[in-house]
Image (cartoon, rainbow, N blue to C red):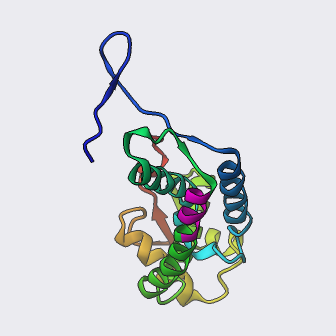
Amino acid sequence: MNIPPVFNEYSKERARTITLEHGAAQAWEAFFNFIESNMGEGKELEQIQDWAGKLAGAALRIAGVMAVVERGESANDISEQTMTRALDLSELLITHAQAAFDLMDGDDSQHDAKHVFRWLLEKGALTFKLADVYRELRRFKEAERLNRALKALTARHIISEPMKSGTGGRPSISFEVNPAIFVKG
């Protein structure tokens, strides 16, 4: 696209602004509410909620690109028709994303690892014991399922390899947490 830049009163290039027509804004808001209401535990988009959380914004950008393709440099708003086409495409992307994430995540280990990761962030501690995870995260009834989640976190250098300690009897198993996960930014 050969669209010339626009400048402000100081001869500095400024961003072009594209607004939404009323009908386009209503259609986008309905899509946003659909996405938000279908994320969370046990809901349709649970497995892809990190991805889905960005979809409404991506749909706006898609609609903006479509408007520019349709009308070139004279595009200063997004019509309801253009927004509808962008939202139709975005809805198709949901099905494809679910299929792709299912292929990448054949079992629940990545989802479980995310759950443990969120728990670590909430806890804020630099170490934890395996027994703490069982006690505080009641979702893990099977040791193997938790072990897969912890191995996924270890592979990403979020937690250390398990460390055994104790004298006699059953050893206590603990992990160190990478302090970098607590750094905001």
Q: Is residue 120 visible?
A: no
Question: As displayed, is residue 114 above or below residue 42?
Answer: above
Image quadrant where residue 13 sits: top left
Question: As displayed, is residue 93 above or below residue 105?
Answer: above
Q: Is residue 105 visible?
A: yes
Q: Count how many numbered circles sit on residues in the image.
A: 0
Region rendered in magenta: 81-88
The location of residue 120, given as percent across then percent down, is 56, 59
Image quadrant where residue 138 sits: bottom right
Whether residue 145 is in magenta: the answer is no
**Residue at horizontal 33 percent and vertical 10 percent from the top:** 10
**Residue at horizontal 64 percent and vertical 68 percent from the top:** 132
Please, which residue is most extreme toward the top here? 10
> Is 131 displayed left or right of 183 in the figure?
right
**140 or 20: nearer the eye?**
20
**35 or 72: nearer the eye?**
72
> Is 4 displayed left or right of 130 in the figure?
left
Question: As displayed, is residue 78 above or below residue 44?
Answer: above
> Is 183 displayed left or right of 172 in the figure?
left
Image quadrant where residue 159 sits: bottom left
Quadrant placement of the C terminus: top left
Question: As displayed, is residue 137 above or below residue 4?
Answer: below
**Residue at horizontal 57 percent and vertical 87 percent from the top:** 143
Prevailing secondary structure class for the magenta stretch in the rendered image: helix
The location of residue 14, given as percent across then percent down, is 37, 25
The location of residue 126, given as percent across then percent down, is 50, 53
Whether residue 86 is in magenta: the answer is yes
**146 or 43: nearer the eye?**
43
The location of residue 64, given as percent across then percent down, is 47, 49
